[in-house]
Amino acid sequence: MVYHDSMDGNSRTLLIVNPIAGHGRGKKIFARIEPRVREVFPELDVRISEFPGHAFQLGREAARERYSRVLCLGGDGTPFEVINGLYIHGRPSFVPEMGLIPAGTGNSFLRDFGIETPEEAVRRFAAGRRLKVDLIEFEFQLGGKTERRYSLNIIGAGLITDILKLTNDWLKIFGKLGYSLAVLIRLARGMDNTIDIEAGGQTWSIQDSALVVSNSQFTGGRMKIAPHAATADGKADLVVFRDVNRREILQIFKRVFSGSHASHPKVEITQAAEMAITGRPPLRVMADGEVLGESPLRIKVLPQELTFLG
């Protein structure tokens, strides 16, 4: 399939490229596949993300210019920025179709669709297949103010975010091993918190715990954190690690790549369309690999909000 622009100019395609994704793989992948992408989308516009947050600006410009399709070449953080640029003023009146080309270290969301290479992503574009996917709208605290963002993949609170921050700040040079090292370093500090949760009409309080809210099965590359999640069911999967000590977290972590951690007695999974999460002390919050702020956290699923090419 070849996508042709219409006479009124309302069928344009924008490709947003993060050249430093995957420790510089983004630039190489773009050079390799650009000719094929232009075959599929003959009137393709390309924008290069030049600094952190630039893809957010480019997403905002894409909304203003009413592109019919926006493609993101990068890791999980690139579509996070682009989508939040599109949704800067809340749900827009016009939402372009979205396409993702994997070039980062994780590319977690695409694994739910069996897309692990840039070539496979472009092949799916050419096939013309479209899918509806949910989007998670959430609010958190930053500098005493309530902020709103949108997540395609996963939101973490507490331990998971602490591990990500350690990885981003100090251990990225170790590649995929960096995340495992961060787990060991963070666990040395132990757990000491109380988390109050409202989800699916239930309210409960847990001690010494951590959680993630997932729209898809995978995070951190191949970690199958929410093995029963579906990207278009109108619900998010709340994965809670309840009352865990260091030894139990390590046991759970070893099983998370296969998804078998879901049967561990200290792991609980609940599905809900809306959630509220409060931590004492406040929990650090991350989404799609980006550390953002802290709890309290409010979450709402927007069912089948996006049209996904692939």
Image (spheres, rainbow, N blue to C red):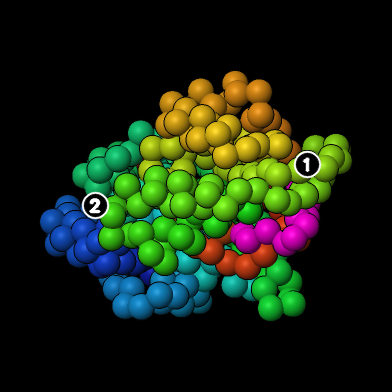
Numbered range of the magenta stretch: 273-285
Specify few, some or many for label 1: CA neighbours under 10 Å numbering under 14, 14-19, or 20 or more: some
Q: What is the three-letter code of the residue carrying label 1?
A: Ile
Q: Quadrant of residue 54?
A: bottom left
Main SS, magenta residues = strand
Please state which of the two labelled residues, at mark 1 or mark 2, is closer to the viewer: 1
Q: What is the three-letter code of the residue carrying label 2?
A: Val
Residue 219 counted in the magenta span = no
Q: Quadrant of residue 30?
A: bottom left
Q: Are marks 1 and 2 in contact (CB under 8 Å)?
A: no
Q: Nearer the viewer, residue 310 or 281?
A: 281
Q: Which percent across, then down, holds residue 305?
A: 60, 50
Specify few, some or many for label 2: CA neighbours under 10 Å numbering under 14, 14-19, or 20 or more: some
Residue 282 counted in the magenta span = yes
Q: Secondary structure at mark 1?
A: strand
- Indicate left or right for 219 with 142 as reference: left
Q: Nearer the viewer, residue 77 or 3?
A: 77
Residue 57 in view = yes
- Indicate left or right for 194 with 220 as reference: right
- Alpha-carbon span between mark 1 and mark 2: 51 Å
User: In the image, what residue occupies the spot 71% across and 37% down?
Assistant: 243
Q: Nearer the viewer, residue 87 or 9?
A: 87
Q: Which percent across, then down, holds residue 55?
A: 41, 71
User: In the image, what residue occupies the spot 31% across and 78% down?
Assistant: 50
Q: Secondary structure at mark 2?
A: helix
Residue 30 in view = no
Residue designated by label 1: 206
- Indicate left or right for 59 with 104 as reference: right
Residue designated by label 2: 40
